[in-house]
Amino acid sequence: MKQKILSAVVAMFASCLLGSAQEYKFDFTTGKKVKEGYTKVTPDTRFNEETGYGYDLIASPDGKTVTPFFFSVCLPDGNYHVTAVVGNKKKAGNTTLRGESRRLFHESVATKRGELKSCTFVINKRNTRINDTESVRIKKREQGKLNWDDKLTIEVNGEAPQLAELIIRRADEVPTLFLCGNSTVVDQDQEPWASWGQMIPRFFDNGVCFANYAESGESANTFIAAKRLAKALSQMKKGDYIFIEFGHNDQKQKGPGKGAFYSFMTSLKTFIDEARARGAHPVLVTPTCRRAFDENGRIRNTHEDFPEAMRWLATKENVPLIELNEMTRTLYEALGVEASKRAFVHYPAGTYPKQEKALADNTHFNPYGAYQIAKCVIEGMRKATPELIPHLSTDPAYNPATPDNPDTFQWSPSPFCELDKPDGN
């Protein structure tokens, strides 16, 4: 109760603040002068509920050591256009920008000494409240995480992270692409875990906004029961999209009325009907394959009838379908039995702090794997939602049969790691 009251107070404060300003402008430069209309940020500007903004989670940058940092602003739910001016007058930089729970927007932006570059993106922010009486029932593992609070948090990372200015304003006009799914889609909060839903924003411009509502361990019906769909619907408007990928956890449900062509399709039909009732466009996504090779080096079907049920429903309801199940099969087989481990959380003991045992997970991706899956989804979008392809900021032109070389993949890890695998399998 105390937490709910505090969240309500913070939200009310943020709403009032934004309502009067409509735009936040922060100056991170070290000079004493402050640009007109900007708020000066110093290392002492730490986040608190009273001001509603500041450096957050870890230590403020001191200008001497090269470390990532986080900056948070209290804001109401919605989409926000962000302009991050990166660079420094005195030294060169290399900056990666992520938001909320490690959603990737810009990577390895190089700046010369004295050079400034404007990096823009649109980001979705939400909390658990649906209305005065309803809230999303988040899991214990989600409590305190960045995707379900009253703050918009920006992560500034990279080989030499730099930030000169930050401008935030509402972006109600852009269509929202809601992502609904499980641990293969969710914004994974900590290293070395990652999913395609947190990588895909990096490839799109300011004309669309991804809102990732997925969560580890969820099935289509439990997603609805936890009111995650209800929360998405409360934010949904005409012209938005909802991408739906389930199957991993649904197939484990046993008993009367359960199964691919029974309860699973009924739940998917609920997603479709609710979205269409609001003028939004549903898109079905078949589940990613597990890394399960047979003796001939071919991927086994571990999802039983669930991908086929999605295909059948897509045809019957005239819903666009992204064939991610088949593309990931091609991807893993192209990498091969051993090399495909490099797309998943397979790490020897001692790779991460306090990691006493090897990590060997054949369902959940690492950043390289999640990046490849995101490119697969984009390939599927070319056929399923071609109207969204003009919003690509860079065209990956990807073929899962010829995946990117994992040796050339670069990733600036966040400062937090987790050794326990996500819910679900």
Image (cartoon, rainbow, N blue to C red):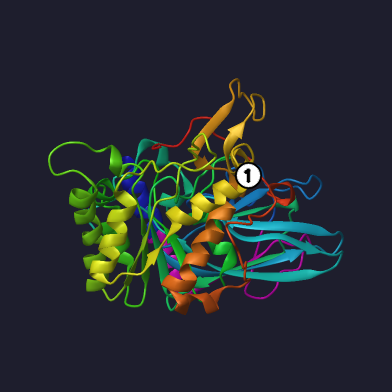
Q: 277 or 59, which lies in front?
A: 277
Q: Is residue 5 above or below residue 75?
A: above
Residue 311: x and y, percent? Answer: 31, 60
Q: Residue at x 36, y 40 (%)?
A: 217
| Corner quadrant of residue 236 | bottom left
Q: Is residue 176 above or below residue 148?
A: below
Tell me the kind of residue under disc 1. Answer: Ser
Q: Which portion, as a residue range, is magenta?
A: 12-41
Q: Residue at x 28, y 76 (%)?
A: 279
Residue 123 in view in this figure: yes
| Corner quadrant of residue 94 | bottom right
Q: Residue at x 43, y 79 (%)?
A: 173
Residue 254: x and y, percent? Answer: 21, 36
Residue 345: x and y, percent? Answer: 56, 37
Q: Can you identify the residue that label 1 sits on?
A: 414
Is-magenta flag for residue 22?
A: yes
View extreme (front): residue: 296
| Corner quadrant of residue 111 | bottom right
Q: Residue at x 66, y 49 (%)?
A: 69
Residue 1 in view in this figure: no
